[in-house]
Image: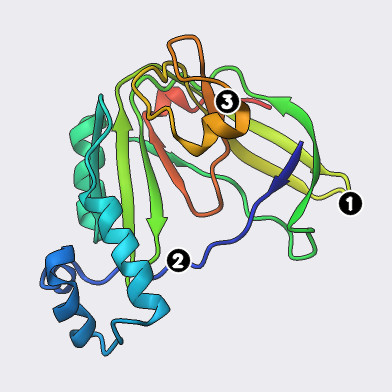
């Protein structure tokens, strides 16, 4: 498969009290830009608006979501979904070697078949001057795989979280880019799978993590 694993720059979290003092709202964006000394026409301001639009957008059917602005708020959301008494673990895609070609063909060497994650939380970093993660859980059926890859250019090894497979897409927007690329229509028998990018996180209960390659 031809794949690309770009390393996304991720901002650091602010202390919770400081993060909560900054409005995470499109209606307050102008004030926040002034606070951060950013011009309203700057690329940073455009990225911040897009991030806030994603945070304030409606959840899809079966989705529970939050934009976490601190480590504490992320952990609290994970506790809400998975359970406060659960000692969950975090899965992610490994960093490529410094010499890895960004876009290349990879050979799939192995796929795990025993990550049973009926409950999970995925967290995706969003562009922002300080760390904001879009964390969510979708209650429709999913399967999770880890994939062992070897690059065809330099033999680079990757351990990719490469399968978050959404088994039922019947409630998805039929105009979603992925359906246009795959030339299929959403439905109960149209699963959609995707790789996790670098620095994107998947929280799962410990019994879900017994994956072997």
Please state the horizontal and vertical placement of residue 88, each as a whole percent of the image.
35, 35
Whole-angstrom CA distance, mark 2 to mark 1, is 27 Å
Dot 2 alpha-carbon crowd within 10 angstroms: few under 14, some 14 to 19, many 20 or more: some
Image quadrant assignment for residue 193: top right
* Residue matched to label 2: 10
In-front residue for pair 142/209: 142
Say whether disc 2 or disc 1 marks the residue closer to the N-terminus.
2
Q: Residue at x 28, y 82 (%)?
A: 40
Q: Quadrant of residue 70?
A: bottom left
Task: Judge whether residue 163 can be spotted in this image.
Answer: no
Q: Position of residue 102 (x, y in %)?
A: 73, 58
- Residue 103 pos. (x, y %): 75, 53
Q: Which residue is mark 3?
A: 211
78 up-or-down from 63: above or below: below
Q: Quadrant of the N terminus?
A: top right
What is the crowding at mark 1: few (fewer than 14 residues within 10 Å), some, or many (at least 20)? few
| CB atoms of marks 1 and 3 within 8 Å | no
């Amino acid at each position: 498969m031809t794949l690309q694993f770009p390393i996304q720059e991720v901002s650091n979290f602010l202390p919770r009290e400081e993060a909560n003092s900054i409005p995470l709202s499109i209606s307050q964006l102008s004030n926040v830009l002034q606070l951060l000394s950013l011009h309203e026409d700057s690329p940073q301001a455009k990225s911040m608006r897009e991030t806030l639009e994603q945070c304030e957008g409606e959840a899809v059917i079966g989705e529970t979501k939050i934009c976490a602005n601190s480590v504490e708020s992320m952990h609290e959301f994970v506790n809400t979904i998975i359970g406060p008494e659960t000692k969950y673990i975090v899965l992610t895609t490994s960093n490529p070697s410094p010499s890895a070609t960004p876009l290349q063909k990879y050979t799939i060497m192995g796929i795990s078949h025993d990550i049973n994650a009926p409950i999970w939380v995925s967290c995706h970093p969003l562009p922002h001057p300080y760390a904001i993660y879009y964390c969510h859980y979708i209650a429709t059926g999913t399967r999770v795989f880890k994939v062992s890859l070897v690059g065809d250019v330099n033999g680079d090894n990757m351990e990719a979280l490469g399968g978050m497979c959404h088994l039922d897409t019947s409630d998805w927007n039929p105009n979603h880019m992925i359906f246009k690329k795959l030339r299929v229509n959403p439905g109960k028998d149209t699963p959609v799978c995707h790789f996790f990018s670098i620095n994107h996180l998947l929280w799962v209960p410990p019994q879900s993590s017994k994956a072997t390659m």
